[in-house]
Every structure is written in C-alpha cells, then in structure tokens.
Amino acid sequence: MSVMLEAARQIRLVPALQAKGAMIVAGGTLAVAELNYGQGADGTLIILDRLGLDRIAVVGKKATFGAMVTMAEIARDRRLKFLHPVCNSIGGPAVRAMATIGGNLFAPAPYGDMAASLLALDAEITIHDGKSAKKYPIEVFFRQRKKLERCLVVSVSFTLPASGSFRYSKAVRRKPVSASVVTIAALLPRRGGKVVGARIALGAMGSHAIRAYKAEAALEGRSLDSATIAAAAAQIAEDASPADDAYASAWYRRQVVPIHLARLLAA
C-alpha cells in the first residue's frame, strides 16, 4: 500500500482532508500501527508539524496543551510535576517522545492513560470542524468521540489542581511499562479535611476513559478514613464495562480495581 504525506498548512483545512479519507499522523504511535495492519488512511497521511500545536502554556491557574504536545515534553516541564507519573507510565522513552495529547484522546482501551487523567482534571477540549473552533467538556467529547474523529483536536485546557489533590495509579502486567490492566486518576480537593468535588476517572474499564460516579459519591463530604475508602472501593466498578484483551480479562479488572483504588486513596 502506497502512502502520501501531506503537511497541513491551515487548521481549518484538515477536516476536509479527513473527510476524503486522509488520516492524521501526530506522533504515529496509533496511525502507523494501523497502517501496518492495512487499516486507516486511504493513501494520505496528514502531518500537523507546521500548525503550531506543540506548545504548553501555563497562565495563572490554567494550563493549555496544544494537541501535538508530547508526553516527553510534559514530563520535562517542572510546572506540571503532578502529571509526570502519568507521562512516565506511557510506553518507553521512544514512545513518550512521539505520543501526543491529541492522539491519546482517541487511543482505544487499554491505552489512553493521559486521557483518563484529563477526565479527572475536568479538561476542556477545543476542536475545529473546518468551519469554526468549538469547545467541549471532556465527558461530552468522549461521548461523541466517534463523530468527532473527522474534526481536528486543537488543544486541551484545564485548571491546575491544588497541591497534593491529584493522584494517579496504573496497574500493568509487565513492568516498567505496558498497556493498562486498570488506570485510576483521581482529583480529591479537600475543605476542612473533607473531600469536596471528587472526580475519579478509570482507564481500561470501558471503551474510553470513564467517570466512577458512585465511588465519587461515596467520598463526597467525607474524610479519607478507612471506612470511607472501603465504601468507595466497593463502588468503583459499578459504572464500568471492561473488556477482555491480551492484558487482562474483564473479570480480573473488576476484581483488582477496588484494591488499587483503596491503595491510591490511602497513600
């Protein structure tokens, strides 16, 4: 299969190319794999390197990542230390140097660890549909992800979490890095020693990153004592629909996710 590379020169022109069957190749960790299996692009790959989407901006309490920002770039940024464990859990150094924010949002389970973290952080996704830029809360983006595959992700923005309020855990079968058995990202703001506004996101527990609403409710307004942690752990799999794959069965994922949540909350 012959493939032609086309460098996009304007953001607004990319969706039209996608509509004709072209595929975006950002870092290539997803697109190239699909090509190797004879899937994906109808002969054309779109390169986004000239669009200026590789910048990180931190202004006040708001962080914005261009869609082409890589995991390695985030891992080098001292302002984003809370995300360094997330980045360092994704592939090896070569993969992290290529894997992008935009690509991770579309990664199929059991991949997409950064997407789960962005869900916990209540991120906002900016896309361009060829006519105008539009902003989507990340949960809405995931619900409409299939439809939005023909749009271009431009950037991701979120409010920086208070120190110590963001937690992350990833269980893998092969260390140091592998696809996820289960990924947990939690935002646990506290007021007066009690959790207020908890957000818990799970990776590899559905077709994309999902919220664990019932576990969040078990934490809300309570201190993180052993009883509260046990109550949240008992609810963590209630909103999930994991699948069987080469890394773990759906049954196994349901069995271990309460254990990993309890450890994360008790840390």
Image (cartoon, rainbow, N blue to C red):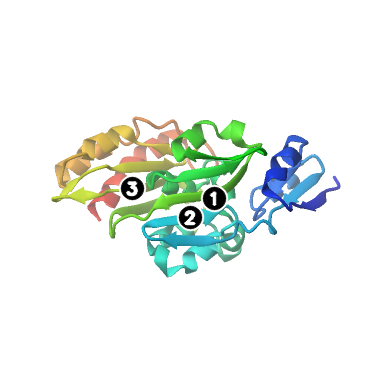
Q: Which residue is mark 2?
A: 64
Decide: marks 1, 2 in contact (CB < 8 A)?
A: yes
The answer to whether 251 appears left or right of 23 in the picture is: left
> In the displayed structure, does residue 235 sit left or right of residue 206?
left
Which secondary structure, mark 2? Answer: strand
Lower sequence index among marks 3 and 1: 1
Q: Position of residue 74 (x, y in %)?
A: 49, 62
Q: CA distance from mark 3 to mark 1?
A: 22 Å
The label nearer to you, 3 versus 2, is 2
Q: Nearer the viewer, mark 3 or mark 1?
A: 1
Q: Nearer the viewer, residue 192 or 241?
A: 192
Quadrant of the frame with the C terminus: bottom left
Residue located 42% across and 59% down the image: 83
Q: Which mark is residue 166?
A: none
For residue 165, which quarter of the picture?
Answer: bottom left
> For the residue labelled by badge 1, is the local secondary structure a helix, a strand or a loop?
strand
Evaluate if marks 3 and 2 touch, with contact meaning CB atoms under 8 Å apart.
Answer: no
Q: Residues within 10 Å of mark 3 (few under 14, many from 20)?
A: many
Q: Is residue 205 visible?
A: no
Q: How many marks?
A: 3
- Give the residue type at disc 2: Thr
Q: Which residue corresponds to mark 3?
A: 186
